[in-house]
Image (cartoon, rainbow, N blue to C red):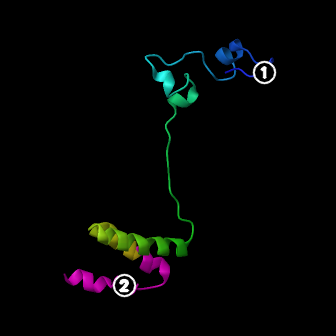
């Protein structure tokens, strides 16, 4: 779409980024025309910025992972909960887990 009387198709084709190439074979029902974003890769990321948040997430991760029987994930969460939460966490008793 070109909005307003100061915008025109040649601007879109040559200088402001949109393109007149439209999707074919019915794809216009769910996607728009060709634009630079079609060539970019989306990258997602997560970042925990403080120790207390990491400790709380570690505790939840340990519990949830154990319910799902992902022991490696559970231990990773337990270790972070202990490291960033200031010591051993009551419910996870890592020494008892290693005896099994």
| Quadrant occupied by the C terminus | bottom left
Q: Dividing the picture into quarters, in which one does residue 91 lie?
A: bottom left
**Residue lying furthest left:** 100
Task: Residue at the far right: name it.
Answer: 6
Measured in 3D between alpha carbons, the distance from the residue under mark 1 to the one under mark 2, in whole angstroms, is 64 Å
Determine if residue 76 is in view.
no
Q: Does residue 53 appear left or right of residue 80 in this picture?
A: right
- Crowding near pointer 2: few (<14 within 10 Å), some, many (20+)? few
Residue 50's spot in the image, x, y percent? 56, 70
Quadrant of the image occupied by residue 95: bottom left
| Secondary structure beneath label 1 | loop
Q: Earlier in the sequence, mark 1 or mark 2?
A: 1
Query: Label for residue 28?
Result: none
Residues shaded magenta: 80-100
Q: Position of residue 60 (x, y in %)?
A: 42, 72
Residue occupying image coordinates x 48% and y 74%: 56
Query: Residue under circle 2?
Result: 91
Question: Does residue 68 appear to the left or right of 2 in the view shown?
Answer: left
Rendered residue at 38%/76% (across/down): 78
Quickly name the residue at label 1. 4
Q: Is residue 98 magenta?
A: yes
Q: Is residue 36 above or below residue 12?
A: below
Is residue 96 one of those drawn in magenta?
A: yes
Residue 80 spot, x, y in % from top left: 43, 74
Task: Report the side of 81 relative to 7 (left or right).
Answer: left
């Amino acid at each position: 779409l070109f909005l307003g009387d100061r915008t025109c198709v040649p601007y879109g084709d040559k200088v402001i980024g949109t393109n007149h190439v439209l999707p074919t074979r019915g794809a216009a029902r769910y996607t728009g025309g060709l634009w630079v974003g079609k060539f970019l890769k989306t990258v997602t990321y997560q970042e925990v910025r403080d120790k207390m948040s990491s400790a709380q997430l570690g505790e939840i991760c340990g519990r949830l992972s154990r319910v799902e029987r992902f022991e490696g994930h559970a231990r990773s969460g337990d270790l972070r909960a202990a490291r960033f939460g200031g010591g051993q966490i009551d419910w996870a008793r890592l020494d008892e887990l290693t005896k099994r």
